[in-house]
Image: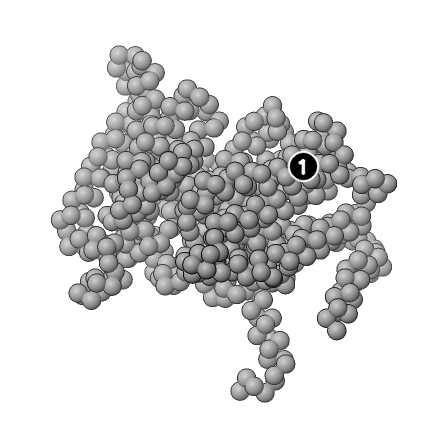
Protein backbone atom coordinates (compact mmCIF):
# COMPACT_ATOMS: atom_id res chain seq x y z
CA UNK A 1 0.00 0.00 0.00
CA UNK A 2 2.77 2.40 0.97
CA UNK A 3 4.53 1.38 -2.20
CA UNK A 4 1.50 2.30 -4.29
CA UNK A 5 1.23 5.72 -2.62
CA UNK A 6 4.91 6.34 -3.35
CA UNK A 7 4.45 5.42 -7.01
CA UNK A 8 1.41 7.68 -7.25
CA UNK A 9 3.28 10.65 -5.79
CA UNK A 10 6.18 9.96 -8.18
CA UNK A 11 3.67 9.86 -11.02
CA UNK A 12 2.10 13.17 -10.00
CA UNK A 13 5.57 14.77 -9.80
CA UNK A 14 6.34 13.51 -13.30
CA UNK A 15 2.89 14.67 -14.39
CA UNK A 16 3.63 18.20 -13.09
CA UNK A 17 6.78 18.27 -15.21
CA UNK A 18 5.01 17.00 -18.34
CA UNK A 19 2.06 19.34 -17.74
CA UNK A 20 4.24 22.46 -17.55
CA UNK A 21 6.10 21.53 -20.73
CA UNK A 22 2.90 20.45 -22.52
CA UNK A 23 1.15 23.70 -21.53
CA UNK A 24 3.87 25.67 -23.32
CA UNK A 25 3.52 23.52 -26.43
CA UNK A 26 -0.26 23.86 -26.41
CA UNK A 27 -0.08 27.65 -25.85
CA UNK A 28 2.23 28.04 -28.84
CA UNK A 29 0.03 25.88 -30.98
CA UNK A 30 -3.07 27.74 -29.86
CA UNK A 31 -1.72 31.24 -30.47
CA UNK A 32 0.50 30.91 -33.57
CA UNK A 33 -0.42 27.41 -34.90
CA UNK A 34 3.16 26.22 -34.63
CA UNK A 35 4.53 23.02 -33.10
CA UNK A 36 7.87 23.64 -31.49
CA UNK A 37 10.04 20.52 -31.73
CA UNK A 38 12.72 22.37 -29.76
CA UNK A 39 10.49 22.76 -26.69
CA UNK A 40 12.24 20.07 -24.65
CA UNK A 41 15.47 22.00 -25.22
CA UNK A 42 13.93 24.96 -23.34
CA UNK A 43 13.67 22.64 -20.36
CA UNK A 44 17.26 21.47 -20.91
CA UNK A 45 18.53 25.07 -21.02
CA UNK A 46 16.46 25.91 -17.94
CA UNK A 47 18.04 22.97 -16.15
CA UNK A 48 21.56 24.13 -16.95
CA UNK A 49 20.67 27.72 -16.01
CA UNK A 50 19.41 26.42 -12.65
CA UNK A 51 22.52 24.28 -12.15
CA UNK A 52 24.70 27.33 -12.88
CA UNK A 53 22.77 29.65 -10.57
CA UNK A 54 22.45 27.15 -7.71
CA UNK A 55 25.67 25.12 -7.79
CA UNK A 56 28.17 27.47 -9.43
CA UNK A 57 26.97 30.87 -8.21
CA UNK A 58 25.60 29.45 -4.96
CA UNK A 59 22.35 31.43 -4.99
CA UNK A 60 19.57 30.34 -2.60
CA UNK A 61 17.08 27.85 -4.08
CA UNK A 62 14.10 30.19 -4.73
CA UNK A 63 16.34 32.86 -6.30
CA UNK A 64 18.11 30.30 -8.48
CA UNK A 65 14.74 28.88 -9.57
CA UNK A 66 13.38 32.28 -10.59
CA UNK A 67 16.66 33.07 -12.35
CA UNK A 68 16.41 29.81 -14.32
CA UNK A 69 12.82 30.54 -15.39
CA UNK A 70 13.72 34.14 -16.30
CA UNK A 71 16.77 33.22 -18.38
CA UNK A 72 14.79 30.54 -20.21
CA UNK A 73 12.11 33.17 -20.92
CA UNK A 74 14.76 35.46 -22.40
CA UNK A 75 15.93 32.59 -24.55
CA UNK A 76 12.35 31.96 -25.68
CA UNK A 77 11.99 35.62 -26.70
CA UNK A 78 15.27 35.49 -28.64
CA UNK A 79 14.16 32.24 -30.33
CA UNK A 80 10.92 33.88 -31.42
CA UNK A 81 12.71 36.92 -32.83
CA UNK A 82 15.34 34.95 -34.77
CA UNK A 83 13.94 31.59 -35.89
CA UNK A 84 10.18 31.63 -35.39
CA UNK A 85 9.45 35.01 -36.98
CA UNK A 86 11.07 33.93 -40.25
CA UNK A 87 9.04 30.71 -40.49
CA UNK A 88 5.61 31.71 -39.15
CA UNK A 89 4.22 32.42 -42.62
CA UNK A 90 5.73 29.27 -44.14
CA UNK A 91 4.21 25.78 -44.52
CA UNK A 92 4.12 23.39 -41.58
CA UNK A 93 6.85 21.29 -43.25
CA UNK A 94 9.27 24.20 -43.06
CA UNK A 95 8.25 25.03 -39.48
CA UNK A 96 8.67 21.46 -38.34
CA UNK A 97 12.08 20.95 -39.90
CA UNK A 98 13.33 24.37 -38.74
CA UNK A 99 12.36 23.70 -35.10
CA UNK A 100 13.74 20.14 -35.31
CA UNK A 101 17.01 21.56 -36.65
CA UNK A 102 17.09 24.02 -33.73
CA UNK A 103 16.60 21.14 -31.31
CA UNK A 104 19.52 19.17 -32.83
CA UNK A 105 21.77 22.23 -32.78
CA UNK A 106 20.99 23.09 -29.14
CA UNK A 107 21.38 19.50 -27.90
CA UNK A 108 24.81 19.13 -29.49
CA UNK A 109 25.94 22.59 -28.40
CA UNK A 110 25.02 21.57 -24.85
CA UNK A 111 27.14 18.42 -25.23
CA UNK A 112 30.09 20.59 -26.29
CA UNK A 113 29.63 23.17 -23.53
CA UNK A 114 28.56 20.99 -20.57
CA UNK A 115 29.72 17.50 -21.58
CA UNK A 116 27.64 14.31 -21.61
CA UNK A 117 28.12 13.64 -17.89
CA UNK A 118 24.75 14.38 -16.16
CA UNK A 119 24.74 17.31 -13.75
CA UNK A 120 23.35 16.59 -10.29
CA UNK A 121 21.73 19.42 -8.35
CA UNK A 122 20.58 18.04 -5.00
CA UNK A 123 19.02 20.62 -2.68
CA UNK A 124 18.35 20.52 1.05
CA UNK A 125 14.76 19.57 0.29
CA UNK A 126 15.50 16.85 -2.24
CA UNK A 127 17.95 15.04 0.04
CA UNK A 128 15.67 15.26 3.10
CA UNK A 129 13.38 12.24 3.28
CA UNK A 130 9.92 12.45 4.87
CA UNK A 131 8.60 9.20 6.33
CA UNK A 132 4.86 9.02 6.96
CA UNK A 133 3.30 5.63 7.77
CA UNK A 134 5.83 3.59 5.79
CA UNK A 135 5.80 5.97 2.82
CA UNK A 136 9.26 7.40 2.13
CA UNK A 137 9.39 10.52 -0.01
CA UNK A 138 11.81 13.29 -0.79
CA UNK A 139 10.54 16.67 0.49
CA UNK A 140 11.13 18.06 -2.97
CA UNK A 141 8.11 16.13 -4.31
CA UNK A 142 5.41 17.94 -2.27
CA UNK A 143 7.19 21.19 -3.17
CA UNK A 144 6.86 20.34 -6.88
CA UNK A 145 3.18 19.47 -6.48
CA UNK A 146 2.33 22.65 -4.57
CA UNK A 147 4.37 24.78 -7.00
CA UNK A 148 2.59 23.17 -9.96
CA UNK A 149 -0.80 24.04 -8.48
CA UNK A 150 0.36 27.64 -7.89
CA UNK A 151 1.74 27.91 -11.44
CA UNK A 152 -1.42 26.59 -13.06
CA UNK A 153 -3.66 28.78 -10.88
CA UNK A 154 -1.51 31.77 -11.85
CA UNK A 155 -1.75 30.82 -15.51
CA UNK A 156 -5.53 30.52 -15.28
CA UNK A 157 -5.69 33.97 -13.70
CA UNK A 158 -3.36 35.33 -16.38
CA UNK A 159 -5.30 34.12 -19.40
CA UNK A 160 -8.74 35.02 -18.01
CA UNK A 161 -8.04 38.31 -16.20
CA UNK A 162 -5.15 40.18 -17.80
CA UNK A 163 -5.30 42.03 -21.10
CA UNK A 164 -2.34 40.12 -22.58
CA UNK A 165 -3.83 36.79 -21.54
CA UNK A 166 -7.18 37.70 -23.08
CA UNK A 167 -5.37 38.71 -26.27
CA UNK A 168 -3.73 35.27 -26.35
CA UNK A 169 -7.09 33.56 -26.05
CA UNK A 170 -8.55 35.81 -28.70
CA UNK A 171 -5.68 35.04 -31.06
CA UNK A 172 -6.16 31.33 -30.56
CA UNK A 173 -9.72 31.84 -31.82
CA UNK A 174 -9.16 34.24 -34.72
CA UNK A 175 -5.86 35.83 -35.61
CA UNK A 176 -7.21 38.07 -38.41
CA UNK A 177 -10.02 39.47 -36.31
CA UNK A 178 -7.47 40.31 -33.59
CA UNK A 179 -5.31 42.20 -36.06
CA UNK A 180 -8.38 44.08 -37.31
CA UNK A 181 -9.40 45.30 -33.86
CA UNK A 182 -5.87 46.46 -33.11
CA UNK A 183 -4.28 43.63 -31.12
CA UNK A 184 -0.53 43.73 -31.73
CA UNK A 185 -0.36 40.11 -32.94
CA UNK A 186 3.43 40.03 -33.18
CA UNK A 187 3.81 41.23 -29.61
CA UNK A 188 1.30 38.63 -28.36
CA UNK A 189 3.17 35.89 -30.24
CA UNK A 190 6.42 37.07 -28.68
CA UNK A 191 4.87 37.07 -25.20
CA UNK A 192 3.52 33.54 -25.78
CA UNK A 193 7.03 32.26 -26.52
CA UNK A 194 8.42 34.02 -23.46
CA UNK A 195 5.69 32.56 -21.24
CA UNK A 196 5.98 29.03 -22.69
CA UNK A 197 9.74 29.06 -22.27
CA UNK A 198 9.42 30.38 -18.70
CA UNK A 199 7.08 27.48 -17.86
CA UNK A 200 9.67 25.00 -19.15
CA UNK A 201 12.39 26.79 -17.18
CA UNK A 202 10.29 26.75 -14.02
CA UNK A 203 9.65 23.03 -14.49
CA UNK A 204 13.41 22.50 -14.80
CA UNK A 205 14.10 24.43 -11.59
CA UNK A 206 11.45 22.37 -9.76
CA UNK A 207 12.37 18.84 -10.83
CA UNK A 208 16.12 19.12 -11.55
CA UNK A 209 16.93 18.37 -7.88
CA UNK A 210 15.12 15.02 -8.36
CA UNK A 211 16.22 14.12 -11.89
CA UNK A 212 19.62 14.91 -13.34
CA UNK A 213 20.25 17.34 -16.18
CA UNK A 214 21.86 16.05 -19.37
CA UNK A 215 22.10 17.40 -22.94
CA UNK A 216 19.56 15.16 -24.68
CA UNK A 217 16.92 15.23 -21.93
CA UNK A 218 14.78 17.34 -24.26
CA UNK A 219 14.03 14.85 -27.05
CA UNK A 220 12.00 12.39 -24.96
CA UNK A 221 10.41 15.23 -23.02
CA UNK A 222 9.16 16.97 -26.17
CA UNK A 223 7.73 13.68 -27.29
CA UNK A 224 5.94 12.95 -24.02
CA UNK A 225 4.62 16.49 -23.70
CA UNK A 226 3.41 16.33 -27.27
CA UNK A 227 1.75 12.99 -26.59
CA UNK A 228 -0.09 14.78 -23.75
CA UNK A 229 -1.12 17.56 -26.14
CA UNK A 230 -2.49 15.02 -28.64
CA UNK A 231 -4.22 12.90 -25.99
CA UNK A 232 -5.75 16.01 -24.43
CA UNK A 233 -7.24 17.23 -27.70
CA UNK A 234 -4.96 19.29 -29.88
CA UNK A 235 -4.31 22.84 -28.66
CA UNK A 236 -6.71 22.60 -25.69
CA UNK A 237 -4.53 23.59 -22.74
CA UNK A 238 -6.59 22.13 -19.88
CA UNK A 239 -6.93 18.86 -21.77
CA UNK A 240 -3.17 18.76 -22.22
CA UNK A 241 -2.62 19.32 -18.48
CA UNK A 242 -5.01 16.52 -17.54
CA UNK A 243 -3.45 14.17 -20.09
CA UNK A 244 0.06 15.04 -18.85
CA UNK A 245 -0.85 13.93 -15.31
CA UNK A 246 -2.45 10.78 -16.73
CA UNK A 247 0.75 9.97 -18.65
CA UNK A 248 2.96 10.77 -15.64
CA UNK A 249 1.02 8.43 -13.34
CA UNK A 250 0.81 5.69 -16.01
CA UNK A 251 4.56 5.92 -16.56
CA UNK A 252 5.37 5.80 -12.86
CA UNK A 253 3.09 2.81 -12.23
CA UNK A 254 4.52 1.02 -15.27
CA UNK A 255 8.08 1.69 -14.07
CA UNK A 256 7.22 0.35 -10.61
CA UNK A 257 5.14 -2.68 -11.47
CA UNK A 258 5.89 -3.66 -15.09
CA UNK A 259 9.33 -2.78 -16.36
CA UNK A 260 11.66 0.10 -15.61
CA UNK A 261 13.47 -0.25 -18.95
CA UNK A 262 10.31 0.29 -20.98
CA UNK A 263 8.87 3.20 -18.96
CA UNK A 264 9.76 5.71 -21.69
CA UNK A 265 7.55 3.85 -24.15
CA UNK A 266 4.42 4.30 -21.97
CA UNK A 267 3.53 7.82 -23.15
CA UNK A 268 3.63 6.56 -26.69
CA UNK A 269 1.51 3.50 -25.91
CA UNK A 270 -1.08 5.68 -24.13
CA UNK A 271 -1.14 8.00 -27.13
CA UNK A 272 -1.67 5.22 -29.67
CA UNK A 273 -4.32 3.57 -27.49
CA UNK A 274 -6.25 6.84 -27.14
CA UNK A 275 -5.95 7.61 -30.84
CA UNK A 276 -7.33 4.22 -31.83
CA UNK A 277 -10.43 4.81 -29.71
CA UNK A 278 -10.78 8.60 -29.91
CA UNK A 279 -8.79 10.13 -32.79
CA UNK A 280 -9.76 13.63 -31.65
CA UNK A 281 -8.19 13.13 -28.21
CA UNK A 282 -9.83 12.55 -24.83
CA UNK A 283 -11.34 16.00 -24.50
CA UNK A 284 -12.90 16.62 -27.88
CA UNK A 285 -11.93 18.68 -30.83
CA UNK A 286 -12.05 22.12 -29.28
CA UNK A 287 -9.11 24.41 -30.03
CA UNK A 288 -8.57 27.27 -27.67
CA UNK A 289 -6.81 28.25 -24.50
CA UNK B 1 21.31 11.31 -76.45
CA UNK B 2 19.72 10.76 -73.05
CA UNK B 3 20.25 6.98 -73.26
CA UNK B 4 23.87 7.52 -74.30
CA UNK B 5 24.50 9.80 -71.34
CA UNK B 6 22.94 7.31 -68.93
CA UNK B 7 24.94 4.35 -70.27
CA UNK B 8 28.19 6.36 -70.21
CA UNK B 9 27.49 7.47 -66.64
CA UNK B 10 26.60 3.91 -65.64
CA UNK B 11 29.75 2.51 -67.26
CA UNK B 12 31.84 5.10 -65.43
CA UNK B 13 30.29 4.22 -62.05
CA UNK B 14 30.84 0.48 -62.62
CA UNK B 15 34.55 0.99 -63.40
CA UNK B 16 35.15 3.23 -60.34
CA UNK B 17 37.01 0.53 -58.29
CA UNK B 18 39.63 0.18 -61.06
CA UNK B 19 39.88 3.95 -61.50
CA UNK B 20 40.40 4.39 -57.76
CA UNK B 21 43.01 1.60 -57.75
CA UNK B 22 44.88 3.37 -60.55
CA UNK B 23 44.60 6.93 -59.25
CA UNK B 24 44.96 6.53 -55.49
CA UNK B 25 46.36 3.06 -54.76
CA UNK B 26 47.21 3.88 -51.13
CA UNK B 27 43.74 5.11 -50.21
CA UNK B 28 41.71 2.61 -52.20
CA UNK B 29 40.10 0.96 -49.17
CA UNK B 30 39.10 4.24 -47.57
CA UNK B 31 37.64 5.75 -50.76
CA UNK B 32 35.67 2.61 -51.59
CA UNK B 33 34.35 2.47 -48.04
CA UNK B 34 33.06 6.06 -48.32
CA UNK B 35 31.53 5.26 -51.72
CA UNK B 36 29.73 2.17 -50.36
CA UNK B 37 28.22 4.27 -47.57
CA UNK B 38 27.26 6.94 -50.11
CA UNK B 39 25.45 4.36 -52.26
CA UNK B 40 23.59 2.86 -49.29
CA UNK B 41 22.69 6.32 -47.95
CA UNK B 42 21.51 7.28 -51.44
CA UNK B 43 19.19 4.25 -51.61
CA UNK B 44 17.88 4.94 -48.10
CA UNK B 45 17.33 8.64 -48.86
CA UNK B 46 15.37 7.74 -52.00
CA UNK B 47 13.10 5.40 -50.02
CA UNK B 48 12.59 8.20 -47.46
CA UNK B 49 11.80 10.73 -50.17
CA UNK B 50 8.96 8.51 -51.44
CA UNK B 51 7.17 9.35 -48.18
CA UNK B 52 8.40 12.88 -47.46
CA UNK B 53 8.78 14.28 -50.95
CA UNK B 54 6.00 12.58 -52.88
CA UNK B 55 3.04 12.09 -50.56
CA UNK B 56 4.10 14.89 -48.20
CA UNK B 57 3.93 12.91 -44.93
CA UNK B 58 6.79 13.92 -42.69
CA UNK B 59 7.57 10.55 -41.15
CA UNK B 60 10.41 10.25 -38.64
CA UNK B 61 10.05 6.46 -38.35
CA UNK B 62 12.55 5.62 -41.06
CA UNK B 63 15.41 4.63 -38.70
CA UNK B 64 13.06 2.07 -37.16
CA UNK B 65 12.28 0.43 -40.51
CA UNK B 66 15.96 0.45 -41.42
CA UNK B 67 16.69 -1.17 -38.05
CA UNK B 68 13.90 -3.74 -38.27
CA UNK B 69 15.17 -4.91 -41.66
CA UNK B 70 18.72 -4.97 -40.32
CA UNK B 71 17.86 -6.90 -37.13
CA UNK B 72 15.65 -9.40 -38.99
CA UNK B 73 18.40 -10.20 -41.46
CA UNK B 74 21.20 -10.16 -38.86
CA UNK B 75 19.40 -12.47 -36.42
CA UNK B 76 18.21 -14.85 -39.16
CA UNK B 77 21.74 -15.04 -40.58
CA UNK B 78 23.49 -15.59 -37.22
CA UNK B 79 20.94 -17.56 -35.13
CA UNK B 80 19.03 -19.50 -37.81
CA UNK B 81 21.85 -19.66 -40.41
CA UNK B 82 19.58 -18.39 -43.18
CA UNK B 83 21.36 -17.70 -46.48
CA UNK B 84 21.52 -14.10 -47.69
CA UNK B 85 19.08 -14.83 -50.54
CA UNK B 86 16.42 -15.65 -47.91
CA UNK B 87 17.41 -13.13 -45.24
CA UNK B 88 17.19 -10.15 -47.61
CA UNK B 89 13.53 -10.70 -48.60
CA UNK B 90 12.75 -11.48 -44.95
CA UNK B 91 14.24 -8.14 -43.89
CA UNK B 92 12.28 -6.31 -46.57
CA UNK B 93 9.03 -8.11 -45.67
CA UNK B 94 9.44 -7.56 -41.91
CA UNK B 95 10.02 -3.82 -42.35
CA UNK B 96 7.12 -3.55 -44.79
CA UNK B 97 4.73 -5.42 -42.49
CA UNK B 98 5.69 -3.31 -39.47
CA UNK B 99 5.21 -0.17 -41.60
CA UNK B 100 1.72 -1.40 -42.46
CA UNK B 101 0.88 -2.10 -38.80
CA UNK B 102 2.32 1.23 -37.63
CA UNK B 103 0.70 3.15 -40.47
CA UNK B 104 -2.84 2.24 -39.37
CA UNK B 105 -2.83 4.25 -36.11
CA UNK B 106 -0.27 6.82 -37.35
CA UNK B 107 -2.26 7.98 -40.36
CA UNK B 108 -5.06 8.96 -38.01
CA UNK B 109 -2.71 11.78 -37.17
CA UNK B 110 -2.08 14.65 -39.54
CA UNK B 111 0.85 16.97 -40.16
CA UNK B 112 2.82 17.67 -36.96
CA UNK B 113 1.09 14.97 -34.98
CA UNK B 114 2.04 12.39 -37.60
CA UNK B 115 5.66 13.52 -37.38
CA UNK B 116 5.60 13.32 -33.58
CA UNK B 117 3.82 9.96 -33.57
CA UNK B 118 6.33 8.42 -35.97
CA UNK B 119 9.17 9.94 -33.92
CA UNK B 120 7.68 8.22 -30.88
CA UNK B 121 7.62 4.92 -32.73
CA UNK B 122 11.28 5.35 -33.73
CA UNK B 123 12.25 6.03 -30.10
CA UNK B 124 10.29 3.00 -28.87
CA UNK B 125 11.96 0.82 -31.51
CA UNK B 126 15.37 1.90 -30.23
CA UNK B 127 14.33 1.33 -26.60
CA UNK B 128 13.21 -2.20 -27.51
CA UNK B 129 16.41 -2.91 -29.47
CA UNK B 130 18.48 -1.76 -26.48
CA UNK B 131 16.53 -3.51 -23.73
CA UNK B 132 15.30 -6.78 -25.22
CA UNK B 133 18.70 -8.25 -24.55
CA UNK B 134 17.70 -11.95 -24.84
CA UNK B 135 16.59 -11.33 -28.41
CA UNK B 136 18.70 -8.51 -29.84
CA UNK B 137 21.69 -8.81 -27.43
CA UNK B 138 21.08 -5.13 -26.62
CA UNK B 139 24.17 -2.95 -26.29
CA UNK B 140 26.39 -6.01 -26.78
CA UNK B 141 25.42 -5.86 -30.48
CA UNK B 142 24.82 -8.68 -32.96
CA UNK B 143 28.26 -9.69 -34.20
CA UNK B 144 29.69 -12.09 -36.77
CA UNK B 145 27.08 -11.46 -39.43
CA UNK B 146 28.27 -13.49 -42.44
CA UNK B 147 29.20 -11.92 -45.75
CA UNK B 148 26.45 -12.33 -48.36
CA UNK B 149 26.52 -15.27 -50.75
CA UNK B 150 24.24 -15.46 -53.77
CA UNK B 151 24.74 -18.95 -55.22
CA UNK B 152 28.29 -19.02 -56.61
CA UNK B 153 28.65 -15.25 -56.11
CA UNK B 154 30.36 -14.35 -52.84
CA UNK B 155 30.39 -10.68 -51.87
CA UNK B 156 33.39 -10.28 -49.61
CA UNK B 157 35.80 -7.73 -51.09
CA UNK B 158 35.38 -3.96 -51.05
CA UNK B 159 34.89 -3.68 -54.84
CA UNK B 160 32.20 -6.39 -54.62
CA UNK B 161 30.40 -4.47 -51.87
CA UNK B 162 30.74 -1.32 -53.97
CA UNK B 163 28.99 -3.05 -56.87
CA UNK B 164 26.36 -4.36 -54.48
CA UNK B 165 25.72 -0.81 -53.20
CA UNK B 166 25.67 0.54 -56.74
CA UNK B 167 23.12 -2.07 -57.85
CA UNK B 168 21.05 -1.31 -54.77
CA UNK B 169 20.92 2.42 -55.44
CA UNK B 170 20.30 1.71 -59.15
CA UNK B 171 17.38 -0.63 -58.41
CA UNK B 172 15.87 1.69 -55.81
CA UNK B 173 16.32 4.59 -58.26
CA UNK B 174 14.42 2.66 -60.94
CA UNK B 175 11.67 1.78 -58.46
CA UNK B 176 11.53 5.42 -57.32
CA UNK B 177 11.31 6.64 -60.90
CA UNK B 178 8.61 4.10 -61.77
CA UNK B 179 6.52 4.87 -58.69
CA UNK B 180 6.69 8.65 -58.96
CA UNK B 181 6.42 9.25 -62.70
CA UNK B 182 3.34 7.63 -64.17
CA UNK B 183 -0.29 7.53 -63.09
CA UNK B 184 0.67 6.45 -59.58
CA UNK B 185 3.14 9.33 -59.28
CA UNK B 186 0.48 11.82 -60.31
CA UNK B 187 -1.85 10.37 -57.68
CA UNK B 188 0.93 10.73 -55.05
CA UNK B 189 1.44 14.36 -55.99
CA UNK B 190 -2.28 15.08 -56.00
CA UNK B 191 -2.49 13.76 -52.44
CA UNK B 192 0.54 15.80 -51.40
CA UNK B 193 -0.52 19.07 -53.04
CA UNK B 194 -4.23 19.16 -52.27
CA UNK B 195 -5.76 16.42 -50.19
CA UNK B 196 -9.33 17.64 -50.50
CA UNK B 197 -9.19 18.03 -54.28
CA UNK B 198 -7.57 14.60 -54.57
CA UNK B 199 -10.39 12.93 -52.62
CA UNK B 200 -12.93 14.81 -54.72
CA UNK B 201 -11.29 13.24 -57.79
CA UNK B 202 -11.70 9.84 -56.06
CA UNK B 203 -7.99 9.55 -55.29
CA UNK B 204 -8.14 8.16 -51.76
CA UNK B 205 -5.38 10.02 -49.82
CA UNK B 206 -4.97 7.39 -47.12
CA UNK B 207 -4.51 4.60 -49.67
CA UNK B 208 -1.70 6.38 -51.51
CA UNK B 209 -0.03 7.65 -48.34
CA UNK B 210 -0.08 4.13 -46.93
CA UNK B 211 1.30 2.69 -50.18
CA UNK B 212 4.25 5.11 -50.20
CA UNK B 213 4.83 4.60 -46.45
CA UNK B 214 4.88 0.78 -46.70
CA UNK B 215 7.05 0.68 -49.84
CA UNK B 216 9.41 3.27 -48.33
CA UNK B 217 9.62 1.25 -45.11
CA UNK B 218 10.19 -2.03 -46.95
CA UNK B 219 12.99 -0.54 -49.05
CA UNK B 220 14.56 0.95 -45.91
CA UNK B 221 14.48 -2.57 -44.42
CA UNK B 222 16.24 -3.89 -47.53
CA UNK B 223 18.92 -1.22 -47.24
CA UNK B 224 19.30 -2.14 -43.56
CA UNK B 225 19.89 -5.76 -44.59
CA UNK B 226 22.63 -4.73 -47.05
CA UNK B 227 24.12 -2.42 -44.42
CA UNK B 228 24.58 -5.17 -41.81
CA UNK B 229 25.92 -7.61 -44.37
CA UNK B 230 28.59 -5.05 -45.24
CA UNK B 231 29.44 -3.84 -41.73
CA UNK B 232 29.09 -7.26 -40.05
CA UNK B 233 27.97 -5.77 -36.70
CA UNK B 234 24.59 -4.37 -35.65
CA UNK B 235 24.08 -2.21 -32.54
CA UNK B 236 20.93 -0.46 -31.25
CA UNK B 237 22.64 2.91 -31.92
CA UNK B 238 22.04 2.32 -35.65
CA UNK B 239 18.35 3.02 -34.96
CA UNK B 240 19.08 6.45 -33.49
CA UNK B 241 16.74 9.29 -34.31
CA UNK B 242 19.75 11.23 -35.65
CA UNK B 243 19.49 9.04 -38.76
CA UNK B 244 16.23 10.86 -39.57
CA UNK B 245 18.07 14.15 -39.23
CA UNK B 246 20.81 12.94 -41.59
CA UNK B 247 18.19 11.85 -44.12
CA UNK B 248 16.36 15.16 -43.82
CA UNK B 249 19.62 17.06 -44.41
CA UNK B 250 20.26 14.94 -47.52
CA UNK B 251 16.76 15.51 -48.87
CA UNK B 252 16.67 19.23 -48.25
CA UNK B 253 20.29 19.82 -49.24
CA UNK B 254 19.72 18.03 -52.55
CA UNK B 255 16.10 18.80 -53.33
CA UNK B 256 12.96 17.17 -51.99
CA UNK B 257 10.90 15.11 -54.44
CA UNK B 258 13.56 14.83 -57.13
CA UNK B 259 15.60 11.71 -57.99
CA UNK B 260 18.64 13.72 -59.06
CA UNK B 261 18.29 16.12 -56.15
CA UNK B 262 18.16 13.37 -53.50
CA UNK B 263 21.17 11.56 -55.00
CA UNK B 264 23.14 14.81 -55.21
CA UNK B 265 22.17 15.45 -51.58
CA UNK B 266 23.38 11.99 -50.52
CA UNK B 267 26.72 12.48 -52.28
CA UNK B 268 27.16 16.00 -50.87
CA UNK B 269 26.18 14.85 -47.38
CA UNK B 270 28.62 11.94 -47.24
CA UNK B 271 31.35 14.13 -48.72
CA UNK B 272 30.70 16.87 -46.10
CA UNK B 273 32.11 15.04 -43.03
CA UNK B 274 35.21 14.19 -45.05
CA UNK B 275 35.67 17.90 -45.78
CA UNK B 276 34.69 19.07 -42.29
CA UNK B 277 36.80 16.40 -40.50
CA UNK B 278 35.81 17.29 -36.97
CA UNK B 279 34.34 15.77 -33.82
CA UNK B 280 30.87 14.18 -34.27
CA UNK B 281 29.17 16.64 -31.91
CA UNK B 282 30.38 19.66 -33.88
CA UNK B 283 29.29 17.84 -37.00
CA UNK B 284 25.72 17.53 -35.63
CA UNK B 285 25.74 21.23 -34.69
CA UNK B 286 26.72 22.10 -38.25
CA UNK B 287 24.10 19.73 -39.73
CA UNK B 288 21.46 21.34 -37.54
CA UNK B 289 22.41 24.87 -38.55
CA UNK B 290 22.75 23.83 -42.19
CA UNK B 291 19.30 22.24 -42.18
CA UNK B 292 17.84 25.35 -40.54
CA UNK B 293 19.49 27.63 -43.09
CA UNK B 294 18.51 25.54 -46.14
CA UNK B 295 14.91 25.07 -45.10
CA UNK B 296 14.47 28.80 -44.48
CA UNK B 297 16.54 30.26 -47.32
CA UNK B 298 16.56 27.66 -50.12
CA UNK B 299 13.83 25.04 -49.65
CA UNK B 300 14.43 23.56 -53.14
CA UNK B 301 18.08 22.79 -52.31
CA UNK B 302 20.88 22.08 -54.78
CA UNK B 303 18.36 20.73 -57.28
CA UNK B 304 16.89 24.24 -57.54
CA UNK B 305 20.38 25.66 -58.11
CA UNK B 306 21.05 23.04 -60.83
CA UNK B 307 17.71 23.75 -62.52
CA UNK B 308 18.17 27.50 -62.50
CA UNK B 309 21.76 27.06 -63.70
CA UNK B 310 20.87 24.77 -66.61
CA UNK B 311 17.94 27.00 -67.62
CA UNK B 312 20.29 29.98 -67.75
CA UNK B 313 22.79 27.88 -69.73
CA UNK B 314 20.22 26.92 -72.35
CA UNK B 315 18.88 30.45 -72.82
CA UNK B 316 21.93 32.61 -72.14
CA UNK B 317 20.31 35.89 -73.14
CA UNK B 318 16.78 35.42 -71.81
CA UNK B 319 17.67 36.19 -68.22
CA UNK B 320 18.24 39.87 -68.85
Residue B116 visible in the shown view: no
For the residue pair A72 and A122, the one nearer the viewer reads as A72
Image-quadrant location for residue A164: bottom left
Q: Is residue A141 left or right of residue B188?
A: left
Q: Is residue A82 left or right of residue B26?
A: left
Q: Quadrant of the N terminus of chain A?
A: top left
Look at 34% across and 28% down and name the residue there: A249
Instruction: Identify the secondary structure beneath mark 1.
Output: helix
For the residue pair B19 and B60, the one nearer the viewer reads as B60
Residue A157 point in image, percent of width and height: 16, 44
Mark 1 highlights which residue?
B90
Q: Is residue A144 left or right of residue B78?
A: left
Residue B146 point in image, percent of width and height: 76, 35
* Residue at the limit of the structure toward the front, as seen here: B202
Residue B183 point in image, percent of width and height: 58, 60
Q: Which chain is mark 1 on? A: B
Q: Is residue B176 left or right of residue B126?
A: right
Q: How is the image coloured?
A: one colour
Look at 62% across and 37% down and name the residue there: B94
Look at 66% across and 54% down and name the residue there: B175
Residue A151 point in image, percent of width and height: 22, 39
Mark 1 residue crowding within 10 angstroms, few (<14) / some (14–19) / many (20+): many
**Image: B214 above or below A260:** below
Residue B89 visible in the shown view: yes
Amino acid sequence: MGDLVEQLVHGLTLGSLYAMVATGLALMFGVVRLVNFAHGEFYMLGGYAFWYAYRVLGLPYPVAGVAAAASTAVFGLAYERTVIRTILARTWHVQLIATLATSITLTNLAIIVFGTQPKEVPTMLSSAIAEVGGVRLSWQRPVVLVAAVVVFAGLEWFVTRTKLGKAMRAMSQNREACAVVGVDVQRVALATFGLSAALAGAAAALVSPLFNIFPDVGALLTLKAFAAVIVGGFGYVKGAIAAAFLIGVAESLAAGYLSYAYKDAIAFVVMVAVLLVRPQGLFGRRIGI
Amino acid sequence: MRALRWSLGGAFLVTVPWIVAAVAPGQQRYILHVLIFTALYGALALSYDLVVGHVGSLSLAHPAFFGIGAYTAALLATEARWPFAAALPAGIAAAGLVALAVGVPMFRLTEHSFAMGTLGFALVAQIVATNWVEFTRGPLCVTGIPKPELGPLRIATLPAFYWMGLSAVGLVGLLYHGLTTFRLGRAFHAVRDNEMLASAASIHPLKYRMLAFVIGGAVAGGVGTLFVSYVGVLCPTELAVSLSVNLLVMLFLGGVGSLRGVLVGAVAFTALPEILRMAPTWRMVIYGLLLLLIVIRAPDGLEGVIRRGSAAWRRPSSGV
